[in-house]
Image (cartoon, helix red, strand yellow):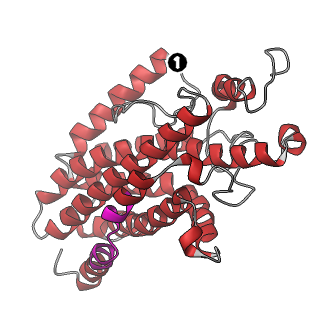
Amino acid sequence: MRSDRPVYRKLEVNYRRNRKQYSTELLDALAADFCYQDCQDEYWHPEEFSLLYGTHLWQQSSPSQRIILNQLYWVAYYSQIISAEIATIFFNQTSAAGLYAQEDFRLVCDTLDLESSQERAHINAFKIICERVEASLFGRRIFSYPMRSPFSETMIFADTNRLKSWWKKVQLHCFGLLSSDNTFLACQYFTVRGLRTLNGKIVQHQLSRYYQNYADKNQVPIPTKISYYHFLDESFHFNSSTIISQDVINCLPKPTKFEKMVANLGIRGCQKDHYHFSVAINGIFWYDPALYSAIYQVLTSNIFGMDSREA
């Protein structure tokens, strides 16, 4: 790959700049310092990124209820990101195994190692804040969950059942096994990763701008800061996906029919995962009927005080 200097240069620049802005220790410190009571009366991102924004419930909510719905969007959104990043860590490593078998691919593997360490910091920060917020508001989990396998459904509120979930698990196991010993499929994973995260980057950019537009950076709520630093990391990760899936892959021999079939199945699966759109939460492809139980718990909590019939 070194013979293709433009591609190698892109990788070098992306890797170097990502290392330079490495913010894992900062994220760890922010998460450790988080206390919900310190920022419970503030919006954490733009108003339109609130749970149930634009619905009749939102329109009839009090100012304090709207603030909580804004904060619950953060909890719900980053609970979904945790699931995606758990899977990303695993497939980064299986893909690195497939790529390292080639000459001059160490830089790609070092990039993926760096990104995986950042993903672990993201997960830790999101998990701490989500759990503390839900414990304070509800005394139990609603959107968050214990740590899970990378072979679970990536969408935490999906149109699925036990059979579909089992079949998805089999497919993910198979792809992990194949990509760890196939350089083309290892690269092709980053096409899927890029597609999965494209919409996320659009949302995360808007969340990060809330921090950038804050007048007094010392008074920014910790979740808002974490959104900003997460976006910085993910910008480099998206660059990696683009370079590997569009440039590095062209350094390889032409794929076989089998490799093309597996690659297309991966893209098809990604499209199916992103088939739905949610009225309840802007920017996530959740299946709203699967979300009813969580919304019901929010509405019957002390925040809204509805009885079962009203909810």
In percent of width and height, residue 274 lies at 58, 43
Q: Is residue 237 above or below residue 295?
A: below
Quarter holding the C terminus? top right
Q: Could you tell me the amino acid type at mark 1?
A: Asn
Indicate whether residue 165 is drawn in magenta.
Answer: no
Query: Quarter holding the N terminus?
Result: bottom left
Q: Is residue 25 visible?
A: yes
The residue to which callout 1 is attached is 161
Whether residue 16 is in magenta: the answer is yes
In this picture, residue 154 sits left or right of residue 300 = left
Of 257 and 295, which appears nearest the observer?
295
Over which residues does the magenta segment extend? 14-27
Question: Taking 302 as reference, is 258 left or right?
Answer: left
Decide: few, some or many residues near mark 1? Use Cα within 10 Å; few <14, some 14-19, many ≥20.
Answer: few
- For the question of whether residue 263 can be seen, the reply is no
x and y percent of residue 116 in the render? 28, 55
Residue sitting at x 36%, y 63%: 245
Q: Quadrant of residue 26?
A: bottom left
Query: Where is residue 44, by image quadrant?
Result: bottom right
Tell me where residue 225 appears, x and y as whole percent.
Answer: 51, 64
- Magenta segment's dominant SS is helix
Q: Is residue 125 above or below residue 65?
A: below
The outermost residue toward the front is 37
Q: Relative to 185, is 237 on the left or the right? A: right
